[in-house]
Amino acid sequence: MNEENIKGQPEMDNGCDETPAEQTKEQAADTCAGQSAPETAEDTQNSPEDSGDKTAALEKELAAQKDKYLRLMAEYDNFRKRSAKERIEITSTVTGNTLAEILPVFDNFERALQTETADESYKQGMAMIFSQMGEVLKKLGVEIIDPTGQEFDPNVANAVNQIQDPELGENIVAQTFQKGYKIGSKVIRYAMVTVANP
């Protein structure tokens, strides 16, 4: 081939920098082989260390969200229990306040039954009404406090009188002037009693 034909052929772009004219083909091939090849898709993927870091970060975030969820559930459960307790307390308070106004009427019925009368039909009618009222109180959870014969307890009774009685033990309730009432542990009205041998 003449020099013109050689010049007319397109130059081959092998991706290598031009080499000196005196470099042989073998040397040029070695030089190109030594250069880094273009990065492939596999090379651009994260290394195992990066994947491990991302997994650890995701696990940490998941643990934080789980902890937040558990705290929220615990707070809701506490709120639910507290609300239920408050409702019970409010119900007891309202019931107690209402009964406190009715109890004097209940006391009068009891006194009426203790009054002697020749009219047995009247007495039986009063006893039925009194019994009916007692059942209503039981349904409302009301308990009667009558500590006669028991040791005096200032948590449920008020001592309005004291006596000396050798037949009774020390600090024993000898007589109950007025019965007390309570709902659960809440006292609606304290019993009025006489205490023996205080």
Image (cartoon, rainbow, N blue to C red):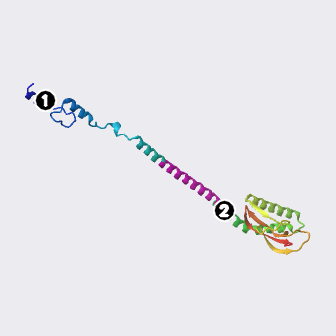
Q: In the image shown, does 19 or 187 lie closer to the viewer?
A: 19
> Which quarter of the picture shows residue 25?
top left
Question: Label 1 belongs to which residue?
Answer: 9
Is residue 72 on the magenta stretch? yes
Q: Main secondary structure of the magenta part?
A: helix
Q: Which residue is mark 2?
A: 89
Q: Where residue 9 sits: x, y (%)? A: 13, 29
Residue lying at the far right in this picture: please name it. 167
Query: Residue, x 43% and y 45% (percent of image)?
Result: 53
In the image, residue 36 lies in the stretch drawn in magenta: no
SS at badge 2: helix
Query: Of callouts 2 and 1, which one flags the residue occurring earlier in the amino acid sequence?
Result: 1
Q: Which residues are magenta?
A: 60-85
Q: Position of residue 192 (x, y in %)?
A: 80, 71
Image quadrant occupied by the N terminus? top left
Mark 1: amino acid: Gln
What residue type is disc 2 on? Answer: Glu
